[in-house]
Image (spheres, grey):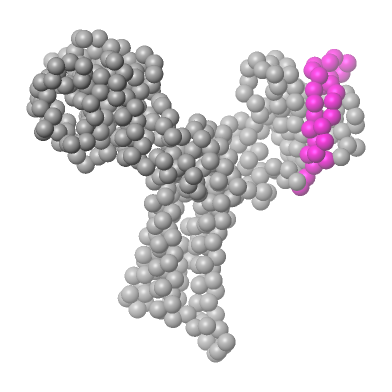
Amino acid sequence: MEDTIAAISTALGVGAISIIRVSGKEAISIVNKIFKGKDLNLVSTHTIHYGHIIDNAEIIDEVLVSIMKAPKTFTVEDIVEINAHGGIATTHRILELLLKNGCRLATPGEFTKRAFLNGRIDLLEAESVMDLISSKTEATRKMAISGVDGKLSLLIHSLRSKIIELLANIEVNIDYPEYEDIEEMTIEELNKSMTSIEHELKDILTNSKEGKMIKEGINTSIIGRPNVGKSSILNRLLNENKAIVTDIEGTTRDVVEGNIIIDGIMLNILDTAGIRETENVVEQIGVRKSLELLEQSDLVLVVLNNNEALTEQDIDILKQVKHKNHIVIVNKKDLERHLDVTTLEPDYIEISALNDEGIEKIKNRIRELFHLEKFENQDMTYLTNARSIALVEQALESLKEVKRGIEQNMPIDMVEIDLKKVWNLLGEITGETYQDELIEQLFSQFCLGK
């Protein structure tokens, strides 16, 4: 990290402002070479200066340059941000001048990587930065900012502190048994502490499921026979004509997708091909896709036709969703009833997609099923990425090994080995222990300039 890096930090395109970021020991002196205005080497930290970017005698752009000197910066290095006029040609020309005068083009996520390696943030905070950038709802924003603020990290640090105290006590008991003023770490005391830590890890995993739902949304599929109104319901939920609607059975042969936000939570809605026996090869593929999506979905909207009697296919679909979160929707309530609703679950919803009646009832039922109201004021301190969740699961398994060792009266120094493994696994979550390959892979997922 001895070299100075530069990258464009704003999206390329026509806009009012674009920002080119520079970080490293020579950041100020390199920018000063192409800046006409105050001598940037002499200005105070955290100040902004008006001037021009020049290439010899040619003026490239009129700019504002922000100077931030180490160590009070994001990367803990000198940082310069050039605020130029938005535009692809101008922005690229300034970047070219920086590279020509001694900068290296930053790799994706390298600014955040430097912040991590320089101790400014930990891995959880770094991943939360990426989550904040990609947030699409208010709930995901709240959750991401909780990570950026370090609340998640404090949670993991607290657990590691409890474990290191236990390890230290065990070490003293083993190495200095003659010290009477040191509390003896009995098997009963150790088991009690392990149970407490186990409960905390289980709570983290339970909450992570909610965090995953907030981050990724609720995958929702609309399932039913052909021509029951699935595409119409999708269009009504999205409030746009996303799917083609006709009276011809089998119109939808592939999955049609759309997204809505309910109480800050994203619903990823999939309108699937009508499920029926068919000789059409293309439609058969669509039906198979529908059945696959049914199994993968967090929520299934089963649509029935009020104007038709219940069929064997309807009954099969209802059986398949019994074990999943689902809502039974009886569509076409504006038509004469031929459906025997007494055979259905008592909490089915009647709607008319044609007349836009009952759509709000579907949204309200979704709110009830997933308790969406609780996320409005709830603490959003959740783990959401697969890496961290997998590490907590591994830590929990290692903790169970500790407890099994205690139950089997294994020597305390053998139990200590598994306890150290728990401590190390939790350290991998925050990056206190890590492998170089992991760091390279993780930060490569960031956008360029961040």
Tell me the residue at 13%/20% (across/down).
Answer: 337
Locate the C terminus and report the quarter of the image it occupies: top right
The residue drawn where x is 35% and y is 78% is 409
In this rendering, position of residue 326 left or right of residue 52: left
Q: Does the magenta portion include 161? A: no
Q: Quadrant of residue 284?
A: top left
- Residue 274 is at least partly visible in this image: no
Magenta residues? Answer: 45-71
Instruction: Specify whether 312 is left or right of 190.
Output: left
Q: Is residue 62 magenta?
A: yes
Residue 87, given in percent of the width and then of the height, sits at 68, 16
Q: Residue at x 59, y 50 (%)?
A: 150
Dominant secondary-structure state across the stretch colored magenta: strand
**Residue 144 vertical placement versus 391 (above, below):** above
Q: Position of residue 130 (x, y in %)?
A: 55, 37
Place of residue 124 in the rendered image (x, y in percent of width and height, measured from the top left): 55, 48
Q: Nearer the viewer, residue 16 or 375?
A: 375
- When asked about the image quadrant of residue 398, the answer is bottom left
Name the quadrant of the N terminus: top right
Q: Is the residue 42 above or below the residue 289 in the image?
A: below
In the image: residue 210, left or right of residue 289: right
